[in-house]
């Protein structure tokens, strides 16, 4: 498992940076393979992927191991999901990263797409005639 380098940043910020990099790498990998920004019923925006990682990977570890140990386990997992060249090249998922993300999106409920909507909807109401 890749160990995160000693950082001057708080663990929360480091976790957020890894989450963003993983989301970007997963989106790019999916676009390269399929030519589409859809993964099943899910629209692949970086923000939605980040939300899925936070809610379904990080929160699961925090719920299982408690806040401190769960957050440390989540950071270790996210670190292990990216190639170590993160600071010198665009983010690339490791084999484990691809497996974790594929499993996440295989099991992600379709309702998540509505829950995690980042778009703005407008409802138009016509006056009574």
Image: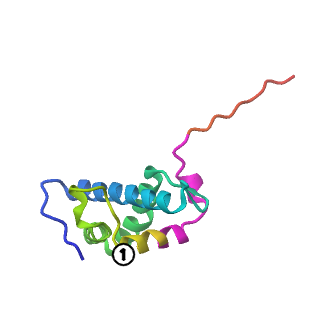
Label 1 sits on residue: 96
Given residues 27 and 73, the one toward you in this image is: 27
Q: Where is residue 69, by image quadrant?
A: bottom left
Near-viewer residue (25 or 117): 25
In-image side of 26 versus 92 (left or right) = right
Horizontal placement of 35 versus 5: left or right?
right
Q: Which residues are magenta?
A: 103-119
For this view, does 72 lie left or right of residue 57? left
Q: Is residue 21 magenta?
A: no
Above or below, 117 against 65 in this view is above
Name the residue: 50% across, 63% down: 33
Q: Position of residue 127 (x, y in %)?
A: 79, 24
Q: Could you tell me how many numbered marks the image carries?
A: 1
On screen, 19 above or below 97? Answer: above
Q: Return the residue nearer the eye: 70 or 105.
A: 105
Q: Residue at x 37, y 65 (%)?
A: 58
Can you say which quadrant of the picture contains the N terminus? bottom left
Up the image or down, 118 lies above or below 34; here it is above
Could you tell me residue 3's position as x and y percent? 19, 71
In the rendered image, the residue lying farthest to the right is 129
Within-10-Å neighbours for mark 1: few <14, some 14–19, many 20+: some
Residue 107: image x %, image y %?
54, 71
Q: Secondary structure beneath disc 1?
A: helix
Q: What residue is drawn where x is 58% and y is 65%?
A: 109
Residue 124 appears at what percent x and percent y? 71, 30
């Amino acid at each position: 498992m890749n160990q995160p380098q000693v950082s001057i940043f708080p663990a929360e910020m480091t976790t957020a940076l890894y989450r963003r990099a993983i989301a970007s790498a997963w989106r790019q990998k999916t676009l390269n393979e399929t030519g589409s920004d859809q993964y099943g019923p899910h629209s692949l925006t970086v923000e939605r992927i980040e939300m899925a990682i936070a809610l379904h990977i990080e929160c699961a570890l925090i719920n299982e191991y408690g806040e401190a140990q769960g957050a440390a386990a989540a950071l270790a997992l996210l670190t292990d999901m990216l190639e170590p060249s993160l600071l010198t090249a665009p983010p690339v998922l490791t084999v484990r990263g691809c497996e974790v993300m594929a499993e996440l999106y295989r099991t992600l409920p379709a309702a998540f797409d509505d829950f995690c909507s980042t778009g703005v909807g407008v409802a138009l109401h016509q006056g009574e005639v």
